[in-house]
Amino acid sequence: MTRVLMVYPEFPDTFWSFRHALKFISKKASMPPLGLLTVAALLPQEWEVSLVDMNVQPLTRHDIVWADYVFISAMVAQRDATHRVVARCKELGATIVAGGPLFLAEEERLEQVDHFVLNEAEITLPAFLHDLEAGTPRRIYSTTAYADLASTPVPRWDLIDLRHYATMCIQYSRGCPFNCDFCNITAMLGHVPRCKSAEQILTELDALYAAGWRGGVFFVDDNFIGNKRKLKEEILPALIAWRQDKEEMSFQTEASVNLADDAELMDLMVRAGFTTVFVGIETPDEDSLSECSKVQNKGRDLVAAVKTMQRAGLEVQGGFIVGFDSDTPAIFQRQIDFIQNSGIVTAMVGLLQAPYGTRLYERLQREGRILDQFSGNNTDSTMNFVPKMDPQMLREGYRRILEGIYTPRAYYARVRTFLREYSKSHTVRTRITRDELMAFLRSIYVLGIRGRERWEFWRLFLWTLFRRPRLFPNAITYAIYGFHFRRICEAHV
């Protein structure tokens, strides 16, 4: 019997870790390691598989020595933790198999890894397993081909304890039709969206439901609306029908800003249970949008686009960047004004980084401006290249943005701006769980009594009760998010 241990190294404390907010709801991690759960489903059924997500439980000596093979997957932000895990496993004599975004450009830095199974596992893992059975496994398996997602299995949800996580996740598509020069998604997964069928998506959701999950589900697609026609004709109608007796399930995803141009698509998404979309806004500066080839954002009123989605029933989370060559010192106040006026509560602002494999990285490398590795953490105040703007001015301006949007007064004002615009969907049942009740009580103590934001907390508390009472749970959630965001800003700036 072949025994495989799957290990997901610990994430650092980042903007998206929500570590400080998770304590309010007694959860240990935001989402489970979907990639490893999917790879586990691709392994031979007769193999014995266990999984350790180090974000929710420790990795023990017994875990490692039990296994014939240790499979490790990681994002770039997990680099340091991954190196520690690899060293520890090797000390105990483990055979290590590694895959995932971190390893695409770093094989030479991880000499202790025995085998790299890179790119899309639906293609490279079967080749590795074939050679392993024959006794002739190579060190590196990679491909430039893209997988047919019809071959992607249902993730092995039985390998984790769902109670540790705030949200579940599934994937509907891979790839993005756009070509932003700083984004490594298209470098890894291509420009043509490849999609699962409605039957596959419902089978995956059925498996989650059968496992007892009743909360939010994040569609981790790079651009959920890459194939609008398939969404409108197949996927969203199927989700609407599936949720008729499962209205406690809600969905989140990522999409490009042109979603605001399609009222029919937004309506279908809301009816299907989508409550939140993350949108790459990046910058209000047209020159910088041209510089990075963000063509889908150019020539439009981005604040109006955000408000259109909010009024349709979708909370818009936004990604923002400073540090483009075209940026001037005026960009810092422009970013603050945009974020505050748009009512984007969850605004991730980062200094520009150049991931390996992107057109931005290649250009900066030709210009001799690359300095270091990409950190993988959008908000850690680092850059891996020499910017055109004076670096000290850039960092001071970046600090100014974070102070301008995440001080309690600015943040809570932005929450109210959003709540004024937001048209809450009637398709998501709001049943208060025990964890949510405990989060509410903790928020009163931590934010309303002990916190330096207590005046702003109670002002939002009362404003929402009297002005938008149906949105009161949302207001408390955003207050808790703000606590996490301020902690992250204080740690990195």
Image (cartoon, rainbow, N blue to C red):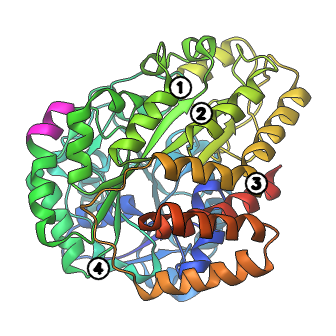
Percent x, y for residue 268? Answer: 20, 45
Nearer-N-terminus badge (2/3): 2
Principal secondary structure, stretch drawn in magenta = helix
Q: Tell whether label 2 touches label 1 (CB within 8 Å).
A: yes
Which residue is more in the foreground, 312 or 292?
312
Amino acid type assigned to the residue bearing label 2 in the image? Pro
Distance in Å between CA atoms under marks 4 and 2:
34 Å
Q: Tell whether label 4 touches label 3 (CB within 8 Å).
A: no
Q: Is residue 409 magenta?
A: no
**Residue pictured at 29% horizontal, 74% vertical:** 157
Is the residue 430 above or below the residue 147 in the image? below
Q: Tell whether label 2 touches label 4 (CB within 8 Å).
A: no
Distance in Å between CA atoms under marks 1 and 4:
36 Å
Q: Identify the residue under disc 1.
A: 358
Which residue is more in the foreground, 227 or 46?
227
**Residue pictured at 56% horizontal, 44% vertical:** 344
Distance in Å between CA atoms under marks 1 and 2:
6 Å
Question: Tag 3, which secondary structure?
Answer: helix
Amino acid type assigned to the residue bearing label 3 in the image? Arg
Is residue 390 shown left or right of residue 1? right
Q: Identify the residue under disc 2.
A: 355
Q: Identify the residue under disc 3.
A: 409
The segment highlighted magenta reads 228-233
Residue 13 visible within the image: no
Q: Is residue 232 magenta?
A: yes
Q: Which mark is residue 158?
A: 4
Is the residue 144 above or below the residue 157 in the image? above
Percent x, y for residue 35? Answer: 37, 58
Q: Quadrant of residue 439?
A: bottom right
- CA neighbours of label 3 inside 10 A, class few (<14), some (14 to 19), many (20+): some
Question: Tag 4, which secondary structure?
Answer: helix
